[in-house]
Amino acid sequence: MSNFTTILPDTSAYWSAYDQVSALNIHLNFFEKLWAAWYQYMDNDTLATGIMSFVMHELVYFGRSLPWVIIDAIPYFRKYKIQNTKIPTAAEQWRCTKLVLFSHFTVELPQIWLFHPMCKYFGMETGVPFPSWVTMAYQIAIFFVLEDAWHYWLHRAFHWGPLYKHIHKIHHTYSAPFGLAAEYASPIEVMTLGFGTVGIPILWCWITGDLHVLTMYLWIVFRLFQAIDAHSGYEFPWSLHHFIPFWAGAQHHDVHHEKFIGNYASSFRWWDYFLDTEAGPEAAKARRERRLAKEAAKARKVQ
């Protein structure tokens, strides 16, 4: 339960609500006061969570995609483009934006308005104070691992003939992906793969009884950054996988779009590595070497 005072006079402006929350709850930090004032100002928790969730998603998705749109328009960055002969045109980016917006408003928005009742049903906290950074960090790390497993198996299933033809093919419209195309997909795919992002934390909350919606928001922000960057089409010397070897990133996912197979995981490389579904020339070479080594060992046994 949150421990801030909930009985406040009616307020006509957000900052008036903030001043009243601050006066009555000096134990809260600045961000907790902003949060509490928003719910007090809205006076409708379902509406408050719904608006905050949708606006957060749109600002992060298009805000993180915008730098990649700008980079695509600057010739200097061509040397970092993985498929440097395939630069998305303004028309392609606009067509992609329209479909993504259509999906956001017709598929995601109705679900977002049900988000607060669902949070409360499963015991997710929406009040203040916020959980510690340590708690949020370890929960987000767990969500990354679990979502990656969900994404690997469902994404791999979507490459089965009928599912690919009728559902997943839309996402493969662009053989050289770009940031805005991260959520360019069939509504069925958006909901199915999106369960890994939204459903897993909700299940975690249901099982453990310990999750704050702020942790959920931070997790979604990180997941959006990961998905958009993976679709950016750019490989830099400072790309994260150079420092975290098992991180996937754009280099890993770009090959998936180019070859239309393999590299099914979202954030990490271990599922593709251990299940031998890595794509690209280096992975093919490693498979050949393993096969030749196995054949040589078998031949030695026969001798």
Image (cartoon, rainbow, N blue to C red):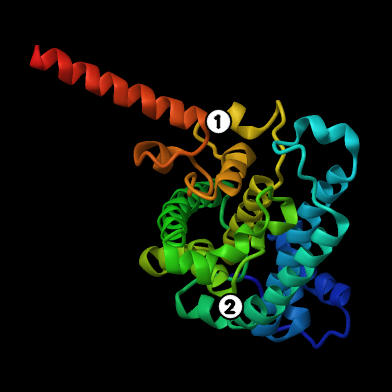
As helix, strand or loop, the secondary structure at mark 1 comes to: loop
Residue 130, visible in the rendered structure: no
Residue 69 horizontal/vertical position (percent): 83, 50
Q: Which residue is mark 2?
A: 115
Indicate the quadrant where residue 290 lies. Answer: top left
| Amino acid, disc 2 | Phe
- Kindly indicate whether the residue at mark 2 contacts the one at mark 1 (C-beta within 8 angstroms): no
Q: Is residue 45 above or below residue 215?
A: below
Residue 295 horizontal/vertical position (percent): 23, 22
From the image, state whether disc 1 or disc 2 is nearer to you.
1
**Residue depicted at x 69% and y 34%:** 235
Looking at the image, which residue sits at the far left?
302
- Earlier sequence position, callout 1 versus callout 2: 2
Indicate the quadrant where residue 162 lies. Answer: bottom left
Residue 86, visible in the rendered structure: yes
Q: Which residue is mark 1?
A: 244
Q: Which mark is residue 98?
A: none
- Foreground of the two, 253 or 245: 253
As helix, strand or loop, the secondary structure at mark 2 comes to: helix
Q: Is residue 134 above or below residue 201?
A: above
**Residue depicted at x 65% and y 55%:** 224
| Amino acid, disc 1 | Ile
- Foreground of the two, 160 or 40: 160
Number of marks present in the image shown: 2
**Residue depicted at x 83% and y 64%:** 94
**Residue depicted at x 55% and y 30%:** 244
- Foreground of the two, 125 or 250: 250
Residue 140 horizontal/vertical position (percent): 53, 51
Circle 2 crowding by C-alpha within 10 Å: few under 14, some 14–19, many from 20: some
The reply, left or right, for residue 261 in relation to residue 219 is: left
- Please identify the quadrant where the C terminus is shown: top left
The reply, left or right, for residue 219 in relation to residue 12 is: left
